[in-house]
Image (tube, grey):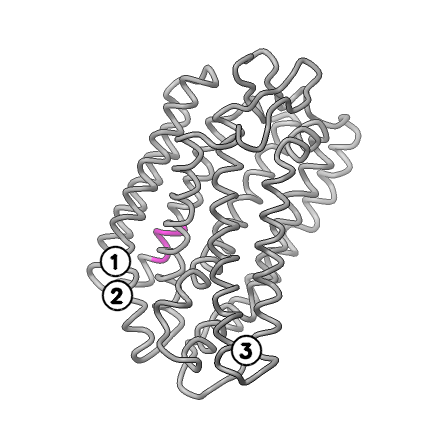
Amino acid sequence: MDLETFWFCLIVVVWAMYFLLEGFDFGVGMLLPFVPRSGEERSTTLRTIGPVWDANEVWLVVAGGATFAAFPAWYATMFSGFYLALLLILFFLIVRVVSFEWRSKSESPRWRATWSWANTIGSFGAPLLWGIGLANLLGGVPIDSDGHYAGTFWDLFSPYTVVAGIAVVALFAFHGATFLTLRTIGDLHDRAERAALRLAIPAAALGAVYVVWTVAMAIDRNDKDLFPPALPAAVAIVALALAVVFILRGRNGRAFTMTGLGIVAAVATLFTSLYPRVMVSSPDFGNSLTVEGAASSHYALAVMSVVAVIFVPVVLLYQGWTYHVFRHRVGGDAVNS
């Protein structure tokens, strides 16, 4: 495997980790107005992700930094063309971060309700736009012969990309509901189970539609064969179907594992469908950016590879230890968040 392909695969892993871990954070935020019934329960719900949500966002920083360093042409075209969409994502992320900090600054029910809804809005808006934005890498955007984005903000919206955004929102909500079943007790736990049951079939159906459509787009827009994109797509469909079965049978831990696997497989489907390109140009396919053409120099990739081999396992070990420490269920006493 050459270094260009290695770094493309590493960036896929980083995006998968971000969606896997931050996915249930977003899901919990989306469910905040609906599953808890009181201010105390909302505080408890936020406690389930309180120790980990900011660490989960590190993977987004790593994804951006790795793309900038390993594939500067990809970074430049994507971040200039998707500028307004990325600015909106940043806005939603900032609103969400502020809501965690400011909600506890007052005991006023109205104040807390306002920031709870701010968390929900941020948790809904960011994944919706992430789904739309990343789907455009494969769906095709106008790129000129110099590799510059030649479209507008509205060119990012198509039936495929909008369905992708909605599917990401549904999958994250389902993932968050299954997470809450593992981290809460009592009535809050029971309502989280009911939310997971309601979300299971719609989320699995939307996820299946998304991965099947992604494979079709790969064949139609990116000159790909059915295999290998069909393999991760099949894994995603099977995992989401099993998540539905497990949640119906009350196997919440297995359901959470399957929602996570389904999300990772969906990310793998997108990037497997994209390779060996990093951005598909439409309507002029010849202007598409390739892994080789968008990459940094061999020396730069070699130095980065040494750093990645040393530090990525450290980050994984530290984050694994964090989850082990905060693995216990929460609930019962009133808390501030």
Residue under pointer 1 = 198
Within 10 Å of disc 1 (Cα), the crowding (few <14, some 14-19, many 20+) is few
- Residue 8 occupies quadrant: top right
The C terminus is located in which quarter?
A: bottom right
145 vs 89: above or below? above
| Secondary structure found at label 1 | helix
175 vs 230: above or below? below
Residue 143 place in picture, x, y as percent: 62, 20
Within 10 Å of disc 2 (Cα), the crowding (few <14, some 14-19, many 20+) is some
Question: Quick check: 123 left or right of 7?
Answer: left
Callout 2 amino acid = Arg
- Residue 291 occupies quadrant: top right
The answer to if 170 sits in the magenta stretch is no
User: Which mark is first along the chain, 3 or 1?
Assistant: 1
Q: Residue furthest front?
A: 110
Give the dominant element type of the magenta stretch: helix, strand or loop.
helix
Question: Quick check: 72 left or right of 158?
Answer: right
Q: Which residues are magenta?
A: 256-260
Could you tell me which residue is drawn at 65 percent across and 56 percent down? 314
Q: Do the numbered discs 1 and 2 sit on residues whose CB atoms are within 8 Å? A: yes
Residue under pointer 3 = 337
The N terminus is located in which quarter?
A: top right
Within 10 Å of disc 3 (Cα), the crowding (few <14, some 14-19, many 20+) is some
Question: Quick check: 149 left or right of 194?
Answer: right
